[in-house]
Structures are given as structure tokens and as C-alpha cells.
Image (cartoon, grey):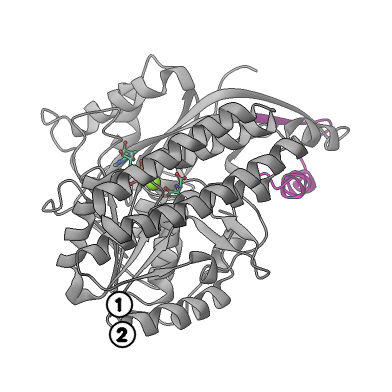
């Protein structure tokens, strides 16, 4: 998310008033009837705190809807319909595991309407031979619409007073389809107008995450994994007491446990540390999640819906600033772009480079400069040929993709010079193309070949989190900002 967009989310006022708790359940936490029953128990436990629910689509459904759309665009309407039929059966099956009798029949009728609408969208996609961003938003948002109906029905069948809320009535966004940004004032107004009366009446609002709508009511989405962001928007809009992100791991871990099974839970971290981790690839939180929470100072908890008694991770304004590495992450699919001025490296060139990237709506992850050239990291190469063309005459642009940025995150790690040297020792025989330290106090990053990223993370994790490794002593000295690009082009 760009800085300008972030500032749009600023919330007036300081401490959260703290009347409500927002509970977001990710895909695996609603993946089947058993998971939804567990969710109901957690909600029952939270009743005294007046919960508001934000739910993701059932696990993998968004990916499947994406495939269904692309197949239709490619003219493979049969495959697309078949997959849609399987999705329908899965949702009906989950409904059957949760409710019976009339309630089941009512849900089946609702789903029939949703799937008829989906089939109509597919026909349009096939006819247009294109899966345009606004159509993607219409199609993908259906996953959350279906799951919120299941959760709503399950809660009611357990005797809980739940109210289904259409997120498109509350989260009002700009028109940037597939990566929309909320229009804060309107969203806050709608959230208060729709949710507060329900909460005051003792109801549990249930809404789909990830989706929103433009001022004209056209469906939008907040980017993949965006339900975390929705929860934070709702929490900030209501000045909630806390935002709970219920997922399939014990909290934010020292690294992705899928890569290092011995990853440990981080008990507490700062908003900035968590935002840095999310931005640099930790899938456990959508990159923009912390922005609304941070602005309105609402604490965020990451919790495990399969292990609810585990304390999880508390994310708050400030955490320990002892310079320890808190976690390691990696962001794959990064490209390094080398911009070499045709004549000399003038400040105007920097401005022109930023303007060109902005015109192409191309965000930059990192930048490093030397006397003779500029190196940028980007997450997509699609616009680079046009950008190179526009800069022709001013600079030569070359790029290399299939890189990964491996990041160490922790408040004030820059103040412990031994962190960088320990890290470099751990990955000494891995070709590091760029090292970045100093852009923030809490991040040291290394650019490596994507093929070595997992190994780099595992080795760094062993170096910093193996029980055999003693805690490095805290040193008062601070290293200067360093940003170094290496390697021949
Ligand atoms: P949900 O469906 O609940 O939104 P996600 O799959 O989006 O869940 O995010 C949870 C996953 O994030 C975990 O299963 C884990 O593999 C991955 N992950 C990556 N980095 C981390 C980390 N540092 N701590 C915890 N989980 C992480
Ligand atoms: N269902 C959406 C996705 O898979 C949003 C989310 O789960 O956060 O991207
Ligand atoms: Mg997620």
C-alpha cells in the first residue's frame, strides 16, 4: 500500500474506547463444518465483549473462483462449470453439517441464487474472452458472501443472535479493482451506522472480509488475503477494544512454520515490527492490516482457532526495544532493476524515475543508490518494458527477476552491529546481491536468488533462534545506515 493511501486511513482520536471486539476468521478457520462449530464456541466465549465477526471464504475457495474465471475467459466453460458445481456441493455439504430442516433448505435456496448469479458472470466472461479486474472482484467476492451466510446460519442454530451484514454496505473504497483502498470517512460513517445499532441490540454482526464497494455500489476487493485488512478497518472504525485475527498457527512466529517447523511464537511485538513483517512477505497478516489499527491504537491479537488456549501474539504500539531479532521473513518474486544514467546521476533523474513508476502505478520495495547507478526492487516486471522505453535517453534500464528478499525484523536491530555480521556469516556461501540496512531501525534485508531463499531463511533461523545459540550481548554502539548493491550485471 502506498504512503498516500495509508495517510487516507488516519483516524482522529487516541486510545480506543474499547466497547467491542472484532474477530476475524481466516479460510482454514471456516474450512468445514467442524471448523465453523469451533468458531461458534469461540464467539460464545467472547459474548461479554460484544463481538463483530469478519470471515474469509472457505479455505482455497478464492483460488478456485479465480481458476473458474480464467477458464471461462479461455473458453473452457465446461471445466469452469464443473468446478463451480464442486464448489456448490462443498458449500451445501458444509451447510448440511451445520443446520438441518427448514434452515438447510433456506440456505440451499440462497446458494442456488448465488451460484446462478456466478454462472451468469461466467457466461459474460466467456463472451468477453476476458477476466477484467472489476469482474474478478464481482466473482471472487462471492466466496466471502457464501461463507458469511454459513457462519451466520451456524451461530443462529446454536441460539446466538447473529445478524448478516453485507460488507459492501460498509466498506466503501476507491475504484482500484482487485486492490482497492477504503475511503476512510465514508467507511467509518457506514460502519458506525450499520454495526452500532446491531451491537446495541445485542446482535453479533457477521460480515465477509476482503470485499467492499465503490460509492456507486460496484463490488471491489482489498487484495488477496484482504480479510485481515477488513478486520482492522472495522476495528478502527468502531474504536474496538481489540482486533483478533484467528488463523491456523499459534500467532506470529519467528518465521513461517511451513519453512521451519521449530519456529517459535512471538509473544508480543510492535505495530511497526508486525507491519514490516507483513509487508516483507509474512502471509499471516495482509500487508495493510496494521495501518488502521495503528492509527486508532487498537491492539491486534493473532490467535490459533485450533488451539484457542494458546496466548497468541499481542501486537501493540510499543514492544521491547532491546535490539533482538524478533522474526525472519522472505518475500519471493522480487526483481532487481538497475537504472544507469546515460550521462550522470542527477537528482532530476531520481524524480523522473519516481514519476515514471507512479504513472505506471508500479510500487517500489527498496532502493539503493551509488555514484553511477540506482538499484530498485519491485514485485512485478509487467510494466518494466514500458518504463524502460520512457526513460530511454535518460537512463538504461535492465532487470533480473526470480529474486527473494530475506528480512530480519526487530525493533532497533540496527543498533546491534553484530546482528548483520552474524546474519552474513550464516549465509556466507549464498550469493547476496543487495544488503539493505538503515532505511528503518527495525529491518535488515538481503536479496538472494529465489532458489536459495528457503535455505537462507532456515540458516538464519538456526543462527538466531536455535536454543544452542546464546543471546548476543547488547551493545550500545550503533552502526551507520548502510545500503549496498553488489554483483555484476
Ligand atoms: P488465514 O487463512 O487464516 O488468513 P493465512 O494462510 O493467510 O491464514 O496465514 C497463515 C499462514 O501464514 C500460516 O499457516 C503460515 O504458514 C504463514 N506464515 C508465514 N509467515 C509466518 C509467520 N512469521 N508467523 C506465522 N505464520 C506465518
Ligand atoms: N479469501 C480471500 C483470499 O483468499 C481473502 C482472505 O482470505 O483474506 O485472498
Ligand atoms: Mg490470510
Q: Is residue 78 left or right of residue 310?
A: right
Q: Residues within 10 Å of mark 1 (few under 14, many from 20)?
A: many
Check disc 2 and report the residue beneath it.
201
The picture places residue 296, in percent across and down from the top left corner, at 40, 73
The picture places residue 266, in percent across and down from the top left corner, at 21, 47
- Residue visible at 16% across and 59% down in the picture: 41
Tag 2 and tag 1, C-beta contact below 8 Å: yes
- Residue visible at 43% across and 75% down in the picture: 237
Write down the region rendered in magenta.
337-363
Could you say which is closer to the camera, residue 223 or residue 337?
Answer: 223
Against 158, residue 443 (above or below) is above
- Residue visible at 19% across and 64% down in the picture: 158
Check disc 1 and report the residue beneath it.
203
| Secondary element at image label 2 | loop
Query: Residue 91 falls in which quadrant of the image?
Result: top left
The picture places residue 171, in percent across and down from the top left corner, at 52, 67
Could you say which is closer to the camera, residue 479 or residue 316?
Answer: 316
As for residue 260 lying within the magenta part, the answer is: no
Image quadrant of ligand 1 equals top left
In the rendered image, the quadrant that contains the C terminus is top right
Amino acid at each position: 500500500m502506498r504512503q498516500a493511501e495509508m495517510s487516507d486511513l488516519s483516524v482522529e482520536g487516541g486510545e480506543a474506547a474499547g466497547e467491542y471486539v472484532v474477530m476475524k476468521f481466516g479460510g482454514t478457520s471456516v474450512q468445514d463444518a467442524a471448523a465453523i462449530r469451533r468458531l461458534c464456541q469461540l464467539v460464545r466465549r467472547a459474548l461479554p465483549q460484544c463481538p463483530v465477526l469478519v470471515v474469509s471464504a472457505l479455505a482455497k475457495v478464492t483460488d478456485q473462483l479465480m481458476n473458474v474465471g480464467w477458464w471461462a475467459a479461455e473458453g473452457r466453460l465446461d471445466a469452469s462449470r464443473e468446478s463451480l458445481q464442486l464448489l456448490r456441493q462443498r458449500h451445501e455439504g458444509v451447510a448440511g453439517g451445520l443446520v438441518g430442516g427448514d434452515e438447510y433448505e433456506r440456505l440451499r435456496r440462497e446458494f442456488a441464487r448465488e451460484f446462478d448469479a456466478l454462472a451468469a458472470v461466467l457466461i459474460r466472461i466467456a463472451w468477453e474472452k476476458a477476466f477484467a479486474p472489476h469482474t474478478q472482484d464481482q466473482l471472487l467476492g462471492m466466496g466471502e458472501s457464501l461463507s458469511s451466510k454459513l457462519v451466520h446460519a451456524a451461530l443462529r442454530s446454536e441460539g446466538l443472535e447473529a445478524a448478516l451484514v453485507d460488507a459492501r454496505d460498509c466498506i466503501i473504497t476507491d475504484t482500484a479493482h482487485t486492490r482497492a483502498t477504503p475511503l476512510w470517512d465514508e467507511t467509518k460513517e457506514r460502519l458506525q451506522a450499520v454495526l452500532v445499532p446491531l451491537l446495541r441490540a445485542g446482535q453479533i454482526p457477521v460480515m465477509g472480509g476482503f470485499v467492499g464497494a465503490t460509492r456507486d455500489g460496484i463490488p471491489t476487493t482489498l487484495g488477496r488475503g484482504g480479510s485481515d485488512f477488513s478486520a482492522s478497518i472495522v476495528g478502527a472504525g468502531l474504536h474496538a477494544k481489540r482486533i483478533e485475527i484467528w488463523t491456523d498457527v499459534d500467532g506470529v512466529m519467528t518465521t513461517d512454520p511451513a519453512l521451519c517447523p521449530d519456529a517459535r511464537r512471538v509473544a508480543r511485538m510492535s505495530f511497526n515490527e508486525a507491519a514490516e513483517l507483513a509487508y516483507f512477505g509474512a502471509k499471516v497478516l495482509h500487508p495493510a492490516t496494521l495501518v488502521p489499527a495503528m492509527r486508532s491504537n487498537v491492539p491486534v491479537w493473532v490467535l490459533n482457532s485450533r488451539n484457542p488456549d494458546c496466548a497468541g501474539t499481542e501486537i501493540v504500539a510499543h514492544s521491547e526495544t532491546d535490539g533482538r531479532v524478533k522474526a525472519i521473513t522472505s518475500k519471493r518474486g522480487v526483481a532487481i532493476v538497475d537504472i544507469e544514467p546515460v550521462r550522470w546521476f542527477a537528482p532530476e533523474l531520481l524524480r523522473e524515475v519516481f514519476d515514471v513508476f507512479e504513472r505506471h502505478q508500479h510500487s517500489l520495495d527498496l532502493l539503493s543508490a551509488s555514484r553511477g547507478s540506482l538499484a530498485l526492487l519491485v514485485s512485478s516486471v509487467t510494466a518494466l518494458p514500458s518504463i524502460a522505453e520512457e526513460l530511454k535517453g535518460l537512463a538504461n534500464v535492465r532487470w533480473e527477476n526470480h529474486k527473494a528478499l530475506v528480512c530480519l525484523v526487530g525493533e532497533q536491530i540496527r543498533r546491534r552491529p553484530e546482528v548483520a555480521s552474524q546474519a552474513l556469516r550464516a549465509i556466507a556461501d549464498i550469493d547476496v546481491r543487495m544488503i539493505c540496512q538503515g532505511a528503518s531501525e527495525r529491518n535488515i534485508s538481503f536479496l538472494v536468488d529465489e532458489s536459495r531463499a528457503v535455505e537462507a531463511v532456515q540458516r538464519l533461523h538456526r543462527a538466531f533462534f536455535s536454543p544452542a545459540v546464546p543471546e548476543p550481548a547488547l551493545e550500545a554502539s550503533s552502526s551507520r545506515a548502510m545500503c549496498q548493491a553488489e554483483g555484476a550485471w
